Amino acid sequence: MNSPTCLMMTISQPEQEKLIDKLQIFKIQGKDKRGCTILRIIGKLFPARIVSVEAVNKYLQEKIYPSLGERQFSIVYVHTGVNRSENFPGIAALRSICDAMPENVKDHLKAVYFLHPSLQSRLFLALFGRLIFTGGIYWKLNYVTRLEFLWEHVKRKEIEMPEFVYEFEEELDDYRPMTDYGMEGDHPRVYIDSTVEPAVSMYSMRCIA
């Protein structure tokens, strides 16, 4: 079996950027209920074994960040179906992507909604989140266990979700875990938006880590 490095060498960086665009891993779409533009990221679609961090950074810098402009925005990261061996870029890559984000873009980022976090991802971010998400991004991270809780903060009709996300939700309906709290973080909340009704309680990751 070819190694990830060998696979990357067979695809040029421009081809990698075209693949990122074709898969629509990153898509600016709709607004949340605070009026912030949404950057939707689909983790399952990320071809980590054949796309380099350099290609990702270049794509973001040329296609995504200029489109955001000076607008305030939120990130909806869909973790549904992410497999560490197939579509997880690694700690170094995540840190590089975060470090390469322009400061004005970080300043305009208001919230990160992490949909369908696994226990492994929670533990990973509890250990490494502060190292990876610099510039205050870590403190804007919110875990969202179900779509119904995401819709309390994001306008449902303005953002598209892949079919596999709804299929996963149906599986959760069959077995609703005891930790299905809604929206939570692994840190104390740093803001309360008075324009949005608090539909769900916030819980600290420390009580389950």
Image (cartoon, rainbow, N blue to C red):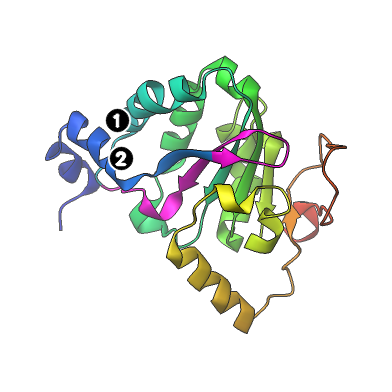
Query: Amino acid under label 2?
Result: Ile
Query: Amino acid under label 1?
Result: Ala
Residue 81 visible in the shown view = yes
Tell which of 34 and 58 is nearer to you.
Answer: 34
The answer to if 37 sits in the magenta stretch is yes
Q: Secondary structure at mark 2?
A: helix
The crowd level at tag 1 (other Cα within 10 Å; few <14, some 14-19, many 20+) is: some
Q: Which quadrant of the structure image shows residue 189?
A: top right
Determine whether, in the image, residue 172 is placed left or right of residue 15: right
> Is residue 207 depicted above or below 97 in this figure?
below
Determine whether, in the image, residue 5 is placed left or right of residue 66: left
Residue that protrudes farthest toward the left in the picture: 10
Q: Secondary structure at mark 1?
A: helix
Q: Which quadrant of the structure image shows residue 6?
A: top left
Mark 2 / mark 1, whichever is N-terminal = 2
Residue 146 visible in the shown view = no
Q: Position of residue 206 (x, y in %)?
A: 78, 53
Instruction: Give me the residue at 44% from left, 51% from top.
Output: 43
Q: Are marks 2 and 1 in contact (CB under 8 Å)?
A: yes
Q: Which mark is residue 55?
A: 1
> Is residue 177 depicted above or below 27 in this figure?
below
Q: Position of residue 37 (x, y in %)?
A: 59, 33
Tell which of 3 and 197 is nearer to you.
Answer: 197
Q: Which residue is mark 2?
A: 20
Q: Position of residue 5 (x, y in %)?
A: 21, 41
The answer to if 156 sits in the magenta stretch is no
Is label 2 or label 1 in front? 2
Q: Which quadrant of the structure image shows residue 57?
A: top left
Q: Which quadrant holds the N terminus?
A: bottom left
Q: Which quadrant holds the C terminus?
A: bottom right
Magenta stretch bounds: 30-49
